[in-house]
């Protein structure tokens, strides 16, 4: 038999086998389902995530011996482990923004764990909630004004990563002085001091873990704990990435402005960038102009690695 004939014969046999399998599957759905489930069970596995033996937020231990506390933590650990796309974005963005946030927390005397508060609040994006909470730290307008942030139609410092972090520190330090616990300070950050005061008084409690709170605040510290735990050992939680997969910190030069800028797009072009990049590096600029009647000094970031950005 020639090689060509052998090849034709082999193709014929394989085709016959495939047709037979298709016929068997179509004529025997029970067998098809059985084989499908065998393949499914072989290749797809979801594991319960092991708990740590000890867990603490800002130096305050979580009472994991309490079944309710353990199960509330378990919920957030599962959600953040298996919502893989969101948690991977957390890792990527944290590589850029934690180096900005961490020194400010340290300088102000706020525990490092609070960087995870910003992470769960906004995903480290300049988000705006339905209630109007804005920026990385999700600060409401009235609260921002109380904390010394400039908020107007042209300038909104809730979008300013350094200044909003300092404002959040101011709130948290005041709350810690009032409540004597960082967990309660975090709860106050989420639900507001007045609402927390009412619950503390009504329930005659003085510990976050002993309070019955609204759904969001009752999950709040546990979300922070879960993300902190995952970040402590990403591979253990199933997350694998390389350094080049993470978002690099922004590189920029700072120029000081103490006068008005009538045309910010033109200002950007004069600096060798475009308006889009100017806003990406300075999201606190909210319009096409900057009115500065009081000659306030503003620091504007201009990207220094223009070839990578343009």
Image: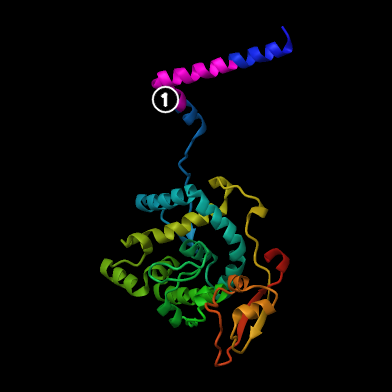
Magenta segment, prevailing SS (helix, strand or loop): helix
Pick the front one: 48 or 84: 84
Q: Residues within 10 Å of mark 1 (few under 14, many from 20)?
A: few
Q: Position of residue 185 (x, y in %)?
A: 42, 70
Q: Residue at left 44%, top 82%? A: 145
Q: Nearer the viewer, residue 39 or 218?
A: 39
Q: Nearer the viewer, residue 293 or 82?
A: 293
Which residue sits at x=61%, y=63%?
96
Where residue 308 appears, as percent x and y from the top left, is 70, 64
Placement of 141 over or under 93, stated as above or below:
below
**What is the secondary structure assignment of the residue under circle 1?**
helix
Outermost residue to the top: 1
Q: Position of residue 116 (x, y in %)?
A: 51, 62
Observer able to see residue 26: yes
Q: Identify the image quadrant of the C terminus.
A: bottom right
Between residue 119 and residue 38, name the one nearer to us.
38
x and y, in percent, of residue 182 in the image:
45, 68
Magenta stretch: give its range: 14-36
* Residue 91 placement: quadrant: bottom right
Tell how many labels: 1
Quadrant (top left, top right, bottom left, bottom right) of the N terminus: top right
Q: Residue at x 59, y 13 (%)?
A: 13
Q: Residue furthest left?
A: 202
**175 sits left or right of 210 in the view:** right
Residue 27: within the magenta? yes
Question: From the viewer's perspective, is 155 left or right of 30?
Answer: right
The answer to whether residue 52 is seen in the rendering is no
What residue sits right under mark 1 in the picture?
A: 33
């Amino acid at each position: 038999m020639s090689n060509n004939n052998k090849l034709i014969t082999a193709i014929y046999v394989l085709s016959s086998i495939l047709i037979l399998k298709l016929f068997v599957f179509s004529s025997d759905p029970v067998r098809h389902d059985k084989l499908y489930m065998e393949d499914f069970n072989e290749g797809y596995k979801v594991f319960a995530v092991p708990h740590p033996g000890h867990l603490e937020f800002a130096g305050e231990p979580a009472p994991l011996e309490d079944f309710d506390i353990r199960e509330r933590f378990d919920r957030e650990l599962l959600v953040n482990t298996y919502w893989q796309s969101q948690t991977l974005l957390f890792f990527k963005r944290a590589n850029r923004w934690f180096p900005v946030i961490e020194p400010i927390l340290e300088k102000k005397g706020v525990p490092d764990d609070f960087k995870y508060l910003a992470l769960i609040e906004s995903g480290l994006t300049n988000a705006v909630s339905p209630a109007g909470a804005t920026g990385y730290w999700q600060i409401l307008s009235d609260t921002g004004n109380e904390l010394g942030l400039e908020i107007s139609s042209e300038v909104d410092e809730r979008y300013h990563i350094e200044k909003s972090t300092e404002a959040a520190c101011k709130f948290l330090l005041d709350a810690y002085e009032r409540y004597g616990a960082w967990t309660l300070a975090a709860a106050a950050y989420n639900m507001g001091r007045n609402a927390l005061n009412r619950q503390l008084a009504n329930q005659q409690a003085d510990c976050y873990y002993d309070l019955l709170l609204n759904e969001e605040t009752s999950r709040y510290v546990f979300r922070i704990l879960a993300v902190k735990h995952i970040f402590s050992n990403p591979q253990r939680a199933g997350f694998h990435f390389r350094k080049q997969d993470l978002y690099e910190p922004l590189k920029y030069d700072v120029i000081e402005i103490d006068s008005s800028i009538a045309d910010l797009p033109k200002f950007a072009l004069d600096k060798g960038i475009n308006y889009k990049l100017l806003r990406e590096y300075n999201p606190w600029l909210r319009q096409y102009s900057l009115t500065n009647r009081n000659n306030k000094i503003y620091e504007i970031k201009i990207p220094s690695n223009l070839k990578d950005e343009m």
